[in-house]
Image (tube, coloured by chain):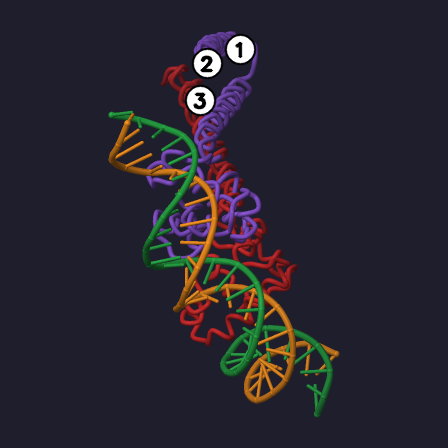
Chain colours: A red, B purple, C green, D orange
Amino acid sequence: MKKTIFIFATLIIALLALFQLSKFSIMQGSSSLEFIIAAIAIIFFFIGIYINKKRAILQEKPKTSEIDHSQIEKIGLSKREYEVLCKLAKGHSNKEIASLLFVSESTIKTHVSNIYIKLDVKRRTQAIQKAIALQILPVS
Amino acid sequence: MKKTIFIFATLIIALLALFQLSKFSIMQGSSSLEFIIAAIAIIFFFIGIYINKKRAILQEKPKTSEIDHSQIEKIGLSKREYEVLCKLAKGHSNKEIASLLFVSESTIKTHVSNIYIKLDVKRRTQAIQKAIALQILPVS
DNA sequence: ATAACACTCATACGAAAGTACTAATTCTAT
DNA sequence: ATAGAATTAGTACTTTCGTATGAGTGTTAT
């Protein structure tokens, strides 16, 4: 944020300097008027593009669908349950998830059952659908 | 397209007129130099914003991702298999899919097994992942 | 300290899912 | 007309999934 303020301040100062410079050189007649106007136009043209692009990127970011942590909390999923849900959504079997998380298959079954209760679903395929709908899953 | 050309032509003419006008009024000293420069700057600033936005919209459109039928063909999924895959991805069980398509559960099992072979997966959860990756599924 | 919660694991049972065939019927294109 | 898909369906078997229940351990907040 400090960086942004610094950049903008520098930019404004540079522009004011440019204004004065262009005014001065026109007064002196040392350079053509068309050139100065064209320079101003081009500079502001690119400033417009730059600012709009910055804004567009900021708006697009949420579209890239990041994880909605508030939803996870609202549903009441614990850290471990969420981990299991992610592996599950990737297409892993209970046994595979157990290996990945270094616990027994029984544990995963317990977690999975609890996830189903919290997500109000009956199958892992439904759990995946719901998780996608809630924007809980990474990257997708 | 004709409309675009017309708009751009009008714009360019307007800008040239503006150039001449600003040059003329500065010569005459009828308006302050600062004002003219500021006007030019603001106009080009907005032109920059406008052009960038147009380009951004054109780039975003293809993101809306519809069903990629060429992929379905490439994989070799039949009509029926694709129907089953869609129901499967919605979270239905084999029995439910059988009811929805008015066939027996055995039939669905056969279809599902064939789908797995064609998608090169071992589980329905993996099939869902693959189908999403291939952009084969409706809306999502 | 102790109640509440998260995480772990086990057993046992029943329900789905998945595999591996075989086979009949119906399209479809050459 | 006929070969080759596609669709349907079955049996038999294995594996995975899901539920229920109980229980031990560790963490945390009151």
As rendered, which of C11 and D25 lies closer to the eye?
C11
Alpha carbon distance from label 2 to label 3: 22 Å
Which disc number belongs to residue B29? Answer: 1
User: Closer to the N terminus: mark 1 or mark 2?
Assistant: 2
Residue drawn at (43%, 42%), measured in percent from left and top? B81
**Picture quarter containing residue A126?**
bottom right
Q: From the image, tell me which residue sits under label 2.
A: B4
- Judge the density around disc 2: few (<14), some (14-19), many (≥20) Cα neighbours within 10 Å: few
Label 2 secondary element: helix
- Picture coordinates of residue A57 (x, y %)? 48, 40
Q: From the image, tell me which residue sits under label 3.
A: A41
Alpha carbon distance from label 1 to label 3: 21 Å
To the question of a shared chain for discs 2 and 3, the answer is: no
Residue drawn at (58%, 64%), measured in percent from left and top? A115
Q: Can residue B19 be seen here?
A: yes
The amino acid on which the numbered mark 1 sits, given as a three-letter code, is Gly
Q: Can residue B27 be seen here?
A: no
Q: Is residue B71 left or right of residue A13?
A: left
